[in-house]
Image: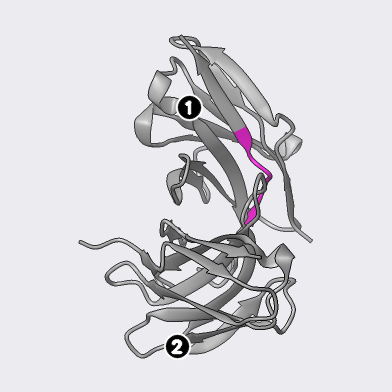
Amino acid sequence: AQSVTQPDIHITVSEGASLELRCNYSYGATPYLFWYVQSPGQGLQLLLKYFSGDTLVQGIKGFEAEFKRSQSSFNLRKPSVHWSDAAEYFCAVGGSGGGADGLTFGKGTHLIIQP
Amino acid sequence: DAGVTQSPTHLIKTRGQQVTLRCSPKSGHDTVSWYQQALGQGPQFIFQYYEEEERQRGNFPDRFSGHQFPNYSSELNVNALLLGDSALYLCASSLRLTGPYEQYFGPGTRLTVT
């Protein structure tokens, strides 16, 4: 069965500092990997996705993530965080069913931005 | 271009009652998935509908059922509500047959069971 682990429940970063959120997955085949962001009381917004090809993927709002098959990881990074980045971040894995699969999410990492 | 919409926004029900939640997919999408997000947790996949049929189901009991209409909108029904069903219910839409997919989420319906 597929699973996603986000080891950090909370992360506190100063505004302007760099950010890395960790994600490890377990999946028996080639995974489709996603990062979503959820602001309080809101639904999920897709930040970026990895299907194949270049292992470094760029997303919206200045985020990027790197797929490392050998480590089963898909960590999210941002060079300089803004106060508006404070939110809950979810890593998710899906199969290659062309849209026929539900996503499996991690438990999320709560990002706090210090002024 | 309207995104995914869900109704109602909030709902309070009593244990044992039944509830129906509604979802309209993003324009052009034909597949609807439902997720349950308990407080402090990540979303959990309930089931997915395509061509008015349930195509895949997560680890949820039969009390959870759904429907998809010809216009691709969908309903989630939960019978015999339990306190543990209190959660944010998220609907996501996608386009099934265009290769690698991505799911667009609605704002959710907050269900409170008392």
Residue at the left extreme? B1
* Quarter the C terminus of chain A occupies: top left
Are the residues flagged by discs 2 and 1 from a single subunit? no
Q: What residue span does the magenta drawing correspond to?
A: A104-109
Q: Is residue B99 visible?
A: no
Q: Verify whether residue A105 appears in magenta.
A: yes
Which residue is situated farthest in the right direction here? Answer: A1
Q: Which mark is residue A86?
A: 1
Please determine whether, in this image, residue A76 is positioned above or below residue B12: above
The spot of residue B28 in percent (x, y) is 28, 72
Residue A60 pos. (x, y %): 36, 36
In the rendered view, does A17 fall on the left or right side of B80?
A: left
Amino acid type, residue under disc 2 in the picture: Glu
According to the image, label 2 marks what residue?
A: B51
- The quadrant the N terminus of chain A occupies is bottom right
Residue B114 x %, y %? 66, 65
Q: Which residue appears at 37% of the width and 82% of the height? A: B72
Which chain letter goes with mark 2? Answer: B
Image point 43% across, 75% down: which residue?
B22
Badge 1 element:
loop
